Amino acid sequence: MFVLPLALLHWAALGSVVFPPDSQWRYFPGRSEASPGDPTAWRQLSFDDSTWAIGQAPFYYDDQPTSATASKDICPAPGDPALTAAFMPFGSDYRGGVSLATGWLTGSIGGAKRIVVGQLTGPGTVKVFSSGSALQGGPATYLYSAMTHELISEFTEAASLQPFGGNTGVRIATTSTTIGADLLVSGFSQEDNATQVRKYQFVRPTPDATMLDANQIAQVVSAADTAPYFLGGD
């Protein structure tokens, strides 16, 4: 029972500096385990941490000392905004701007609200993204503890359509239903020479499908204009 204290006294007598006060450390930003799949892997000496960020000690949060790393750059404080998702829905070359909406499209497949993105210019492609649902076997955010998945949510494409034939930019919104939400899309119809607002419902075509199909269920507005209307959802 006296082994540990004697060992500590021995190291103190040597006066060795184990970690200099200004040493550099590798760290993993976020609130999730640094090795998803095997939460204990990063604790092993053989773990490869070469991709982690490098910060200089001491670590701090509020009052900034000289040559130190801010903990707030690793984990946001309660109430502070935090990045939870980032992706390029139309690739890095698209520069035309987007219309955004969120909603429980096809709510029966579960998961969090989908993110819907429409191109303001160009072909007017509309894409639906999901952070997990029955399409992927279930939403990881809800199936596992918050400590076992990444702080940054991964969104995957769940549907894609060009409501006006790829000839016009669009604006979008979602409207709630008793079982989820439908999608509203506004754009210019060359065939009818009018600006229209169309309503779409998304369905899973087969039990094992990983993408949703969009079915137009209504034409809400058709008017003699040339530009998409601004839309608001509920």
Image (cartoon, helix red, strand yellow):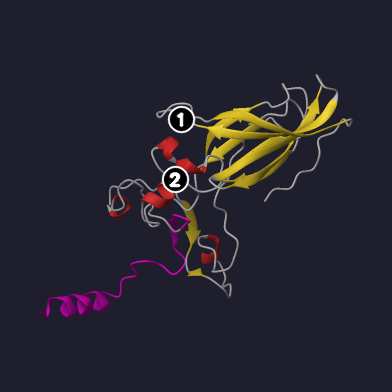
Task: Give the residue number, with chain letter if any, for mark 2.
Answer: 51
Question: Would residue 132 be visible to someone looking at this image?
Answer: no
The percent coordinates of residue 119 (x first, y second) are 72, 33
The percent coordinates of residue 53 (x first, y second) are 48, 52
Q: Which residues are magenta?
A: 1-30
Question: Looking at the image, which is closer to me, 79 or 93?
Answer: 79
Quadrant in the picture for residue 79:
bottom right
Q: Residue at x 58, y 72 (%)?
A: 64
Q: In front of the other: label 2 or label 1?
A: 1
Quadrant in the picture for residue 23:
bottom left
Question: Looking at the image, which is closer to me, 176 or 50?
Answer: 176
Mark 2 touches mark 1? (CB < 8 Å): no
Above or below, 54 relative to 186: below
Closer to the chain start, of discs 2 and 1, is 2
Task: Give the residue number, with chain letter if any, for mark 1.
Answer: 210
The percent coordinates of residue 211 (x first, y second) are 50, 29
Q: Residue at x 49, y 31 (%)?
A: 204
